[in-house]
Image (spheres, rainbow, N blue to C red):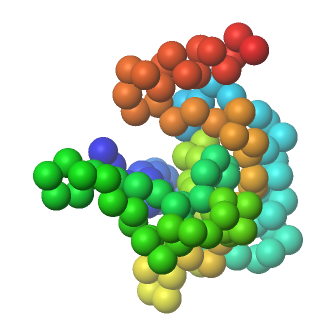
Amino acid sequence: MTPVSHVVDHCVEWLREHDVAPMYTCLVFCNAFIQADDIARGWELLAVNKCANSFSVTEYCHPIERALHYGDNNLVKMYRPEHRFTRTQDCDKSIYDAGQFYWSDVIKYSSQENNKDLWADATAVMIPRERNVDIDYPQDWVVSASVQNL
């Protein structure tokens, strides 16, 4: 899998090789739930906040502080055992990159300080969970189809 920052770099380099000097880039990825209003909102947030990047995020459906994983001998362990007795409603809400679109101010994005990190100096458009299904595995297709049919 190619990091999105490499795709932005390639896009900018290709345009420059073809005598186009972009001020901004917008990468849009295939997603059944993407909406033009969200992409437009991303542009607005980039412009208003004068930041390097703007992209889509969505909320984790369960607190990451109470996440589990399989440890040694396939026994379940908490990533953050200090939250064993924290009620889920008392945990912070966390978000993650929804991967639908990425706006970048080319000059700010390309600066040394920013280190070409799409999450640095960034703002984000919140996408409702029901409009974001990341398709990585066959089961994700089933989830996406069932959400579309609701």
Along the line of sight, the residue nearer the viewer: 22 or 106 = 106
Q: Is residue 150 above or below residue 4?
A: above
Quarter of the figure that contains the N terminus = top left
Q: Which residue extends farthest front?
A: 85
Image height check: is 31 above or below 107? Answer: above
Q: Nearer the viewer, residue 96 or 24?
A: 96
Question: Which image quarter holds the C terminus?
Answer: top right
**Residue, far top:** 149
Residue appearing at x 43%, y 22% in the figure:
139
Residue 94 appears at what percent x and percent y?
Answer: 63, 62
* Residue positioned most to the bottom: 113
Q: Can the viewer see residue 98 in this picture?
A: yes
User: In the figure, is residue 32 to the left or right of 68?
Assistant: right
Q: Position of residue 50 (x, y in %)?
A: 76, 77
Image-based side of 44 in relation to 118, left or right: right
Quadrant of res 146:
top right
Whether residue 24 is visible here, answered yes or no, is no
When asked about the image quadrant of residue 24, the answer is bottom right
Q: Residue at horizontal 57%, vertical 54%?
A: 97
Rendered residue at 51%/36% (across/down): 134
Which residue is painted at 33% across and 60% down in the image? 77
Point out residue 9 in the picture as x, y percentages from the top left corner: 42, 60
- Apparent side of residue 48 relative to residue 56 in the rendered image (left or right): right
Q: Viewed as shown, does residue 100 lie left or right of 130? A: left
